[in-house]
Amino acid sequence: MKKNELHPSPFEIGTFILIIITSILGAIIGLEIISSLGVTPNTSIIGALIAMVLARLPLNFFKKFKSIHRQNLVETSISSATFGAANSLFIPIGIPYVMGRTDLIIPTLIGATLAMYIDTFMLYRLFDSDLFPAQNSWAPGVATAESILAGDKGGKRAGLLGVGGIIGIIGSSIGIPMSAFGVAFIGNAFALGMFGLGLLINQYALPLFKVDISSMYIPHGIMVGAGVVALIQAGFLIFKNKSSSDSSTNSKYTRSPQATKKTLSIGYIGYLVVAIILALLGGLISKMSIGMLAAFLVYAAFAAIVHEIIVGIAAMHSGWFPAFAVALITLLLGILFGFPPVSLAILVGFTTATGPAFADMGYDLKTGYILRGNGKDKRFELDGRKQQYYAGLIAFTIAVVVVALSYHSFFGQKMFPPIDAVYVSSIKAGATAKIAEQLAIWAIPGAIIQFIGGPSKQLGIMLATGLLISTPNASWAVLVGLHHFVFHEIRLREIAEVSKETQAKKIKLESFPNKIFDISKVTNFVSYKRPLNIIFNEPKKNFIPTLPKNVLKKINNFVLINDFRPFGGFYLSDDNHRDYEKELKESILRLSEKFTSLNLIGFGPISSFAALFYHQYSLTNVSSYVSDDFLGSLDNFERIQNLSPSLSKYLMNFFQENKFLPTDSIKDSVKIYFRVKNNLSSDHFFISKLLSTIPRLKNLPFSELNKTEMGNLNFNHA
């Protein structure tokens, strides 16, 4: 990405034509599959592949599609058209058809169309806010971005993508939901743990324990309770900084809390206006009293916005969203409130139109966020996000046209989304006091679990999502993936939320002027006569490991340093943080000046590099304990290529300008305590980004780290 680069526009003639073609294709695919199988496929990668194939045709006109940003626009359009046509439009108009009220199809289509546009507008305005951070999982978006990057760069990355695709095809062919397994590599460990637990209970409650959780409305009750608490937590997130528009919380996101509040207010008013239009077109004014009509309008707008927020939260954390089930919950509550059948059909169609487009646009914007450098250039990111929004609007408009022209054909063949029959049967059956009682009872544990997990983990929402989704063996796919990879790590943003000023006070430092690294307090303090052990954590691309307590308790006087950039930025300065190295050196000096000696500890390629790098500024009484796979020279060029482009370039320049360690002057004080068996050469670093290096810490010479020494530490920070 070049400085001041302009993002491609969806209105460029070639891009615009391709967007129209792929949108028509996506809408048709969505309608066919939702009416036959009852599900909606994610067609993002299909759109990206079409653009990639065209880019390789020997015509100058198609060369422009080599741009990953144009590919992003195309995948956004086909995906938006697919979910827009199937979930936001066809499901809502199928409800009056199944109910026998064909006179309500056109009014419902108009209302669903307006709701879909509002839904997309709200996600565009809420993405990368404290409510829906861009740094969160949005797993399908990550998968699409990695596919586009693999196609762009080729080589090993494309080969690994191909291997992963083959494994996915094989697993899916034998009945294993490989998408669930893949999500476990990307998503939040805590959220996906509860999601997997919910899937497990859903699959085995009936065959093993003879408990039909659906007929007892257990999942629905838990979602109601968790949803109420989630809304309260969202309110706290939005309003906590109302008097501080330039707070540190705001600076983390491109959308401020004030913008979030404004967007939610506009969204609610918009949904209220659409509810009024639906009431007029559906003839509800003549069928309901003024009081009940007012209650219906307020509830319909509230249900629509709640539906999209809950669906969005689930999609953000798990890559799956329980849109059908949450819409059913809003319907059940509407039945309990006593709204008449026609109004209930309009209500569930209206709420169903919100959520899916919201979640899908979140996936697409996450793809663009990664392709544009994870927000490094704010201007380029915001411009690219706006262009994606325009591409989505074009696709949604195409979807409206396709649905309007084709629904007669589908309904004439008795083809409609299967979930519509569930909604209509629920309306006809009505509600009983028993249902209300079950919802109320199970809302309590849902609320408690959601409260315990907090807004960052969304445990209650994710448990309910798992309980509401019936996909055989998905639970095992999620839990196996989590067991081997994710439970060893925690999301970067969860550590980043710790206040740097609070940490500074704990270890008696004035402050940490640099906001991207964090130094813990001195833990397991014994004596200043023993060494200070500084551990550099081993960051991954999107994660920072949490180190095991059973290892840390063996180390006296230890401090942990984290860096919150992808791969920790190798604990080096970059264009945005030019004084980083100076600040970190000075922080280490101030922290260690009372101790007699200093040990710098790494346990992987990046942390060992950092230990050696900061070791070179010491004169006496400093030792480094590292693994032998640290990146130390341009001999590691192939490993460096596996990093992000900007970091790869920085490191290559660094190694060209610096004679790196270990040099003869410090060779005796560098201790390699872990040697990688069966060294994998250039492949090793790429694999180590997936596999945990934490077990290496067990090989540390703990007695040596904790020994008593006399003398003064001399650390050169000039």
Image (cartoon, helix red, strand yellow):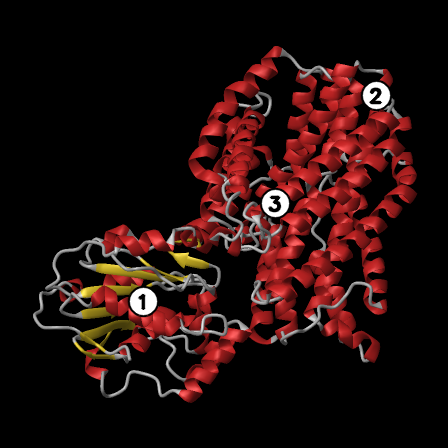
Left or right of 522? Residue 294 is: right
Q: Residue at x 27, y 62 (%)?
A: 697
Q: In percent of the image, x 13 and y 62: which residue is there?
A: 528
- Image disc number at residue 284: 2
| Amino acid residing under circle 3 | Thr
Q: Earlier in the sequence, mark 3 or mark 2?
A: 3
Q: Position of residue 266 (x, y in %)?
A: 70, 40
Q: Residue furthest top?
A: 433
Disc assigned to residue 415: none
Query: Which marked residue is nearer to the observer: mark 3 or mark 2?
Result: 3
Q: Are marks 3 and 2 in contact (CB under 8 Å)?
A: no
- Locate residue 120 relative to residue 167 in the image: left or right: right
Which amino acid, by three-letter code, is at mark 1?
Answer: Phe
**Mark seen at residue 603:** 1
Q: Nearer the viewer, mark 1 or mark 2?
A: 2
N-terminal label among 1 and 3: 3
Q: Looking at the image, can residue 33 be seen?
A: no
Between 166 and 493, the residue placed more toward the observer is 493
The residue tagged with tag 1: helix, strand or loop? loop
* Quarter of image, res 224: top right
**Quadrant placement of the N terminus:** bottom right
Specify which label sits upstream in the sequence, 1 or 2: 2
Q: Give the numbered dot on residue 260.
A: 3
Separation of marks 1 and 3 at Cα, in angstroms: 41 Å
Q: Is residue 413 above or below residue 282?
A: below
Name the amino acid, label 2.
Leu
